[in-house]
Image: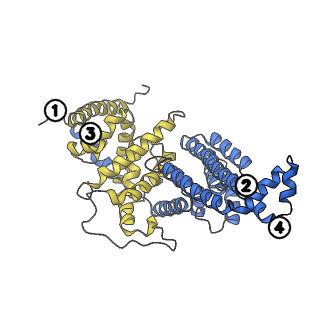
């Protein structure tokens, strides 16, 4: 059994004041609607882009799913790589390799050049995977960089630093003009401009967003940011 | 204090075409939201969240509630559970905010419904809320959480200790100190003194 020090009760006038202040009022219907729409938009956005805007607000922080995603990425990448490797390690690619060595070995040239012709095909196969691997790598890196910039903007905005948020959004726009998270960037820009008191600009950005993405899941959130 | 969700009430969950359950279409969550969003917003304000951020953070708390609803134990009261989530969200906000400190100066009721209550009663309630919220700001945050849960939300101390994950004696001790601080701060505010 635990013992605790006796606690003085509050005087009656303070009790009465707390009673008056106690019951929270209901939200205005338009505020409830707006919040529910925004919640829908965030859930949809999260489902559409698991590492996107909403992820950072997960209860376990922005990196809750990252290990999963990273692991899944590695496994998929490994499987894909193994598949490509098996496809490309047949006889034809060896010829290609030999041909590349021809530059320094004249005798090999004589042996290999007459070889029957499917030479172009292996070249396609051996050249294709490399850029593909680079591209997916780059995309992943880009997405992470985009995410980091937008997270920085979001944190700045939450901290009341609209100017700092806008600076990060500008940097995102500069580096990833048509980035994967461009719509999220524009939503944050509207919010930051409203917070900075630059309402006309916010409305202009929102209007552009509506034109470019008339059915985007974040559109309700953009509208809500202006209210 | 509002208790848990009605027992056995599990309305069918609707999904949109892509299979995502939307908060507005999940009847169980929607009912909870309409009933508890006002409480959540009030709690965040009492925890010191600035009026300009309170709507965003209410949304954040509600999003987490939506995600965690399947983990909620219906045998426990609902509001302390929501309070625990709001407390974490407010703490995260405070950590970011520390770099750009800004103290709420007045009560902002723009989110609240215009009630049908008598105008004088409404004014008295508003003044009381304003005074209470200003006095709460003077309380150290851990004490403030216990005070809000106990003296405003009517939560028993053992449940508070569970919600905040602190020993029972610590919860009692915080409540005692919080009441002392609250009394002193209200007296200070009512006497019109300024500066701390």
Mark nearer the viewer, 4 or 1: 4
Number of marks in the image? 4
User: Which tag, 4 or 2, sits closer to the chain's start?
Assistant: 4
Residue A152 circle label: none
Most foreground residue, A56 or B88? A56
Cα separation between marks 3 and 1: 23 Å
Q: Looking at the image, do the residues carrying marks 3 and 1 touch, with CB atoms under 8 Å apart?
A: no
Residue B70 lies left or right of residue A170; in this view the side is: left
Residue A4 circle label: 1
Mark 3 neighbour class, 10 Å CA radius: few under 14, some 14 to 19, many 20 or more: some
Cα separation between marks 4 and 3: 95 Å
At a point 67% along the width and 48% down the height, the residue shown is: A198
At a point 33% along the width and 35% down the height, the residue shown is: B142
Which residue is label 2 attached to? A131
Q: Quadrant of residue A136?
A: bottom right
Query: Residue A137 at x, y = what percent?
Result: 65, 51
At a point 37% along the width and 48% down the height, the residue shown is: B85
Which residue is label 4 attached to? A117
- What is the display colour for chain B? yellow
The extreme left residue here reads: A1
Query: Residue A147 at x, y = what percent?
Result: 60, 48
Residue B45 lies left or right of residue A217; in this view the side is: left
Cα separation between marks 2 and 1: 69 Å
Label 4 marks which chain's residue?
A
Mark nearer the viewer, 3 or 1: 1
Q: Quadrant of residue A156?
A: top right
User: Which tag, 4 or 1, sits closer to the chain's start?
Assistant: 1
Q: Could you say whether the residue bearing mark 2 is in a helix, strand or loop?
A: helix
Which residue is label 3 attached to? A14
Q: Is residue B90 above or below residue A212?
A: above
């Amino acid at each position: 059994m635990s013992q605790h020090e006796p606690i003085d009760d509050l005087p009656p006038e303070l009790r009465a004041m707390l009673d008056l202040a106690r019951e929270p009022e209901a939200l205005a219907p338009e505020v409830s609607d707006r919040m529910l729409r925004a919640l829908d938009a965030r859930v949809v956005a999260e489902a559409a882009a698991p590492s996107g805007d909403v992820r950072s607000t997960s209860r376990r922080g922005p990196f809750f799913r990252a290990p999963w995603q990273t692991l899944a990425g590695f496994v998929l990448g490994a499987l894909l790589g193994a598949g490509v490797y098996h496809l490309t390690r047949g006889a034809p690619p060896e010829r290609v390799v030999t041909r590349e060595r021809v530059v320094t070995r004249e005798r090999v040239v004589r042996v290999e050049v007459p070889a029957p012709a499917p030479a172009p095909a292996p070249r396609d196969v051996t050249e294709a995977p490399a850029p593909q691997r680079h591209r997916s790598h780059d995309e992943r890196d880009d997405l992470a960089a985009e995410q980091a910039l937008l997270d920085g903007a979001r944190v700045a905005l939450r901290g009341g630093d609209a100017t700092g948020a806008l600076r990060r959004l500008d940097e995102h726009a500069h580096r990833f003009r048509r980035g994967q998270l461009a719509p999220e960037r524009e939503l944050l820009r509207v919010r930051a401009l409203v917070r900075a008191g630059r309402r006309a600009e916010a409305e202009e950005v929102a209007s552009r967003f509506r034109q470019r993405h008339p059915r985007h899941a974040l559109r309700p959130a953009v509208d809500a940011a202006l209210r | 204090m509002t208790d848990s969700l009605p027992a056995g009430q599990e309305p069918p969950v609707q999904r949109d075409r892509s299979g995502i359950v939307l908060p507005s279409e999940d009847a169980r969550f929607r009912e909870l939201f309409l009933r508890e969003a006002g409480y959540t917003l009030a709690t965040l304000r009492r925890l010191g969240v600035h009026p300009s951020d309170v709507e965003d953070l209410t949304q954040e708390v509600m999003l987490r509630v939506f995600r965690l609803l399947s983990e909620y134990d219906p045998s426990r009261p609902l509001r302390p559970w929501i309070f625990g989530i709001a407390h974490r969200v407010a703490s995260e906000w405070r950590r970011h905010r520390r770099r750009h400190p800004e103290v709420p100066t007045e009560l902002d009721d723009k989110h609240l419904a215009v009630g049908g209550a008598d105008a004088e009663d409404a004014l008295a309630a508003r003044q009381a809320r304003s005074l209470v919220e200003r006095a709460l700001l003077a309380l150290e945050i851990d004490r403030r959480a216990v005070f809000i849960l106990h003296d405003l939300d009517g939560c028993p101390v053992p449940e508070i200790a569970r919600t905040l994950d602190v020993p029972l004696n610590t919860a009692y001790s915080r409540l005692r100190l919080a009441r002392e601080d609250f009394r002193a701060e209200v007296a200070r505010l009512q006497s019109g003194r300024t500066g701390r």
